[in-house]
Image (spheres, rainbow, N blue to C red):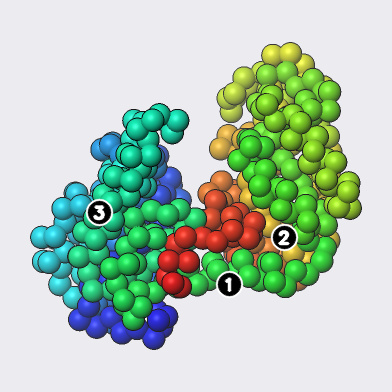
Amino acid sequence: MTIDQFNFSGKKAIVRVDFNVPLDENGQVTDDTRIRGALPTLKKILNDGGAVIMMSHMGKPKGKVNPKMSLKQIVPAVSKALGVDVKFAPDCANASEEAAALKMGEALLLENLRYYPEEEGKPVGIEKDAPEYEEAKKAMKKSQKEFAKKLASYADAYVMDAFGTAHRKHASTAVIDEFFDKDNRMLGYLMEKEVNAVKAVLSNIQRPFTAIMGGSKVSTKIGIIENLLGKVDNLILCGGMTYTFAKAQGGEIGNSIVELDKLDVALDVIKKAKENGVNLVLGTDCIAADAFSNDANTQVCPANAIPEGWEGLDAGPETRKLFADAIVGAKTILWNGPAGVFEFDNFTGGSRAVAEAICEATANGAFSLIGGGDSVACINKFGMADKVSYISTGGGALLEAIEGKVLPGIAAMEA
């Protein structure tokens, strides 16, 4: 069943959305991309004459109530975006009364799913190598099913529209579907768009294909990096991982972030890139700072010769040109992860150079896919969201899809 084929008139639909949005110190939403991404699905339900129950996680409360991660904070933002006064249920597992009282045309937001360990389905407070872990895991799986059943009881239909969590086998993404027959469960518009965008990149690669992988750690990106080495023509590695590669090649990186246990991995990536004929683009210079602060003193120096007491926080001018050269001529572009500490205004230059080059390539006919929270935040911060082909709401899910992994949140719906 597709969402277009389904008539929600007189029905309550529970929708797994991804409202894990960034908040400032006052609990105000600073980037509502994910909320806006869910609107077509939510409005379809309401316009059909149905009622909508939204469920999401926020942050990593690890099975405990944490007011700083309460979804109550985003009710005003969701209400404004949806054009409906959104009601709030302060306990997602005990919201039967709120769900029952919901009238057609109304909307309800449940409290953070991850306040319950059952959502993620992992035993809490027990180490994986502990003898009692397997027994606790079995018990948790049973509890997870009961939790999913409770959530399902609130509604007549289930819509999965949280691509950002589709790679997780959680109660709300890949277990709840068991309690709805095939005619009453479906992917939302955002999920359909995300899946099609990934297919557009992988099944119809126009060359040259340039991928830009940023972020602080090699370890979190190694799977996708190795996978991309068999697909791309140019691979740009930037952000904090720059310094692990510089260190691996014998460079001096001062106080820069580094994964000392991944130096051999970095060297292996360099070797595999050569073997696959991939143009691996690494930073040659950087903007170094004497403190991790927006107001720190700065200097431009080689990425492999950073003075003691200084740390690389952004790509340097030479590096920006190298990145742009590898991007501008591309016909397919994937960007995941910033080129520097873009949260600090004085260290946005590298990420901005990447974004500008992507926009230029897109204007020349390239297909550009931006994915991952930080990259999306970058493109929005620079006001360039309308100049790229597609912005994905998923980081990990997007990367796993491109790696060719099966996403539980999608597989469950297709079963």
Q: Which residue is mark 3?
A: 147
- Picture coordinates of residue 371 (x, y %)? 59, 55
Q: Is residue 9 above or below residue 285?
A: below
Q: Which residue is mark 2?
A: 333
- Picture coordinates of residue 169 (x, y %)? 42, 54
User: Residue drawn 88% across and 48% down?
Assistant: 275
The part of the image, by quadrant, that contains residue 389 is bottom right
Q: Is residue 135 left or right of residue 364?
A: left
Q: Mark 3 against mark 2, which lies toward the viewer?
A: 3
Spatial separation of the CA atoms under disc 3 and disc 2: 40 Å
- Picture coordinates of residue 281 (x, y %)? 82, 44
Q: Which of 355/38 is in front? A: 38
Q: Is residue 99 above or below residue 347?
A: below
Q: Which residue is mark 1?
A: 196
Q: Secondary structure at mark 2?
A: strand
Badge 1: few (under 14), some or many (20 or more) residues near its Cα, within 10 Å?
Answer: few
Is tag 1's residue or tag 2's residue first in the polypeptide sequence?
1
- Picture coordinates of residue 261 (x, y %)? 68, 26
Q: Is residue 5 visible?
A: yes
The quarter of the picture where the N terminus appears is: bottom left
Q: Mark 3 against mark 1, which lies toward the viewer?
A: 3
Q: Are marks 3 and 2 in contact (CB under 8 Å)?
A: no
Three-letter code, disc 3: Phe
Q: Secondary structure at mark 3?
A: helix
**Total marks placed:** 3
Q: Which of 260/122 is in front? A: 122
User: Residue drawn 78% across and 41% down?
Assistant: 269
Three-letter code, disc 1: Asn
Q: Is residue 319 above or below residue 196?
A: above
User: Residue drawn 63% across and 50% down?
Assistant: 336
Q: Is residue 80 visible?
A: no
Spatial separation of the CA atoms under disc 3 and disc 1: 31 Å
